[in-house]
Structure formats: structure tokens, C-alpha cells
Amino acid sequence: MIVVTGGEGFIGKNLVQRLRLDPDISVVSLDTRNTSIDYIYNWITTNAKLIDGIYHIGAISDTTEQDERLFEIYNINMSIFIWNVCSSNQIPLVYASSAATYGDGSLGFDDELDIDAYQPLNQYGWSKQLVDERVTILANKDNYSPPFWAGLKFFNVYGSDESHKKRMASMVYHTFNQVMSSGKVKLFKSHRKDYAHGEQLRDFIFIDDIIDVCTYMMKEKPTSGIYNVGTGKARSFNDLAKAVFKSMNKRERIKYINTPKDLREQYQYYTQATTKKLRAVGYTKPFTELEDGVDKYVKDLLH
């Protein structure tokens, strides 16, 4: 039996759908959208001996949320609880970390460096950073870990089943809806002299690639550790918008607006994963090019 926490969320739902394509896998989806966090604690504790693997994807992922208590309850405490269950019962674990742990990117995006120096820009990023730090200590110093574990630092993910994220949905989703309603898209202006408007760069990764890496990790169980999951190729928001216009067969119309003040201080101008570590453990599948992923996603949205 494979357990997926956050199974009603964006990445979790896509993961559950992929896993259920295999008739030999029994999948249990747990999510606070349809049950309580106490129920999830009790269910995992009661059924631990029956679990063959856990994908811990569930978390509060709103980067504008300021309530530290919520992050402590849902992101930190739950993650450590699952780590402890997997360690005590020798259950393989794949959990969701985030590229938000890298902060402003001034120290790079290298998953082979010491993680302690990174300074996230928001409470969400800090919640993921603290979990990464804690499990690294437990695994390396206390020798207390699952038989295999992987913390996956997801970069900017886009793809189907993300509409519920609303403001936090991908820019592909927002661009599509803006073009459908007004024929144009609004992108953030640059508030830095070294970046032109719309030329802020992100490592955009298609949801199918995320699920491929997740399932690879659980199936192959390479060296345990923390891994980047990005394409290794930064692209601009202008590139993304143009790809959406092309897939929709619409004329390009882009308007640049000021970045909202509640986002401006924590806004990343550049993200790009290093992928050497992931490739070194045997993951060889090419990542989806932005234009190809956008085209597939837009076709899904149009239907």
C-alpha cells in the first residue's frame, strides 16, 4: 500500500492518478481538504505496518501566508511525524521540499551544498527549510531515517488540476485565463535595473516531469538525500506568455504592471535548478521544453 498525503492538491492529485494506472499498486490518498489532520495522524499510526511507501506532498503552499502557527502545524510538525513513522517502521519516504528554500538565489541553487546557509524569503520557504535541516541531522548525526528517503525541491510547477490554488496557481494558468477574458496578459514589471520587464527568470517544470521524478525515486530508491527537481533551464515570463499566446492561436498582447507590495520583498528574479545530482543517481529522462508543456496544458484547458 502506497500513501499520498496532499492527494487532493495539485501535485498530489496528479501523483495519485499516475499511481492508480498500475493495477498492482494500492493507493491511499489523505488530505485535509476532506478529513481532519488528527484523522491523518491516527490513520497513519494505525496502519503503519501495512504501508509500503509514503509520498508526503501535503502542505500549506501559499507563499503570502504569514501565520507561523499554521506552517508549524501543517508543514513542520506533520513532516517530522511522517519522518518518525517511516524511520520506526522502515517505510521508504519521498517528501516535497521547495526551491523557495534558496531564498533570493544569491547563494545559487545547488542541491549538493550545505543547506544551512540558505535564507528563504517567506514563511512557506522557512517551513520547508526547517524540515530539510531537521531530517538531515536525524539521518546523518542520529542515524535515524527511513530505509530510503528523498526530499524533492520542486521549482516552478505548472500543469493540470491546479485551478484550486487560485492566486498561487502557475503563471501559465493565469495567462490562459487572462487571455480568454481580455485577450491580453498582465506581467509584473521589473523593479531591478538588471532585469527588463517580463524578463524575470524561472525554472518552469511541467507536472508530468514532477510525477516522473517522484515515481522514479520510490521505485529505484537511489542514494537518499535532498534533490532539486527542475529542468536546469531558466526561462522568462515573456517566453511563457508568448508560448501561451501561440498555443491559443492569439495575437501577443502583454501589459506590465507593478509587483504587489506584499510580494515585492520576497520576489525571486531568477531560479534555475542544478540537475547534476539527480542525473548522477540515474535519472536520464529529458525534461519537457516550456513550449511543449505549455501547449499540452493549454490544449487541456481549452477542452
Image (spheres, helix red, strand yellow):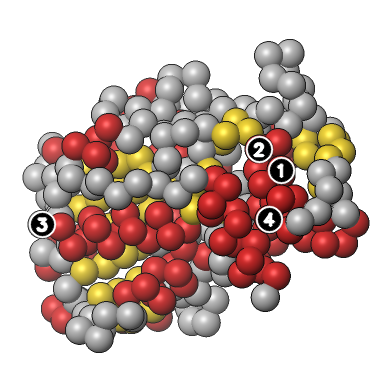
Left or right side of 295 for 154: left
Residue found at x 74% / y 58%: 248
Q: Earlier in the sequence, mark 1 or mark 3?
A: 3
Residue type, numbered disc 4: Ser
Disc 1 crowd, CA 10 A, few/some/many (<14, 14-19, 20+): many
Q: Nearer the viewer, mark 2 or mark 4?
A: 4
- Please tell me whether mark 1 or mark 3 is closer to you in this view: 1
* Circle 3 residue: 147
The residue depicted at 31 percent of the width and 64 percent of the height is 55
Closer to us: 188 or 178 = 178
Seen from this angle, which residue lies furthest right? 182
Pointer 2 residue: 239
Q: Of the numbered discs in the image, which one, if any, rests on residue 247? A: 4
What distance separates the C-alpha of mark 1 from that of mark 3? Answer: 45 Å
* Quadrant where the C terminus is found in the figure: bottom right
Percent position of residue 69, x then y: 54, 53
Mark 2 vs 4: CB contact within 8 A: no
Q: Earlier in the sequence, mark 3 or mark 4?
A: 3
Label whose residue precedes the other's in the sequence (2 or 3)? 3
User: On the image, which quarter does residue 241 sit in?
Assistant: top right
Earlier sequence position, callout 1 versus callout 4: 1
Q: Observer-nearest residue: 20 or 63?
A: 20
Neighbor class of circle 4 (other Cα within 10 Å; few <14, some 14-19, many 20+) is: some
Q: Is residue 52 above or below residue 46?
A: above
Distance from disc 3 to disc 4, alpha carbons, whole Å, reads 44 Å
Q: Rounded to the nearest whole Å, what is the CA distance between mark 2 and mark 1? A: 5 Å
* Residue type, mark 3 in image: Pro
Q: Earlier in the sequence, mark 2 or mark 4?
A: 2
Q: Which mark is residue 1?
A: none
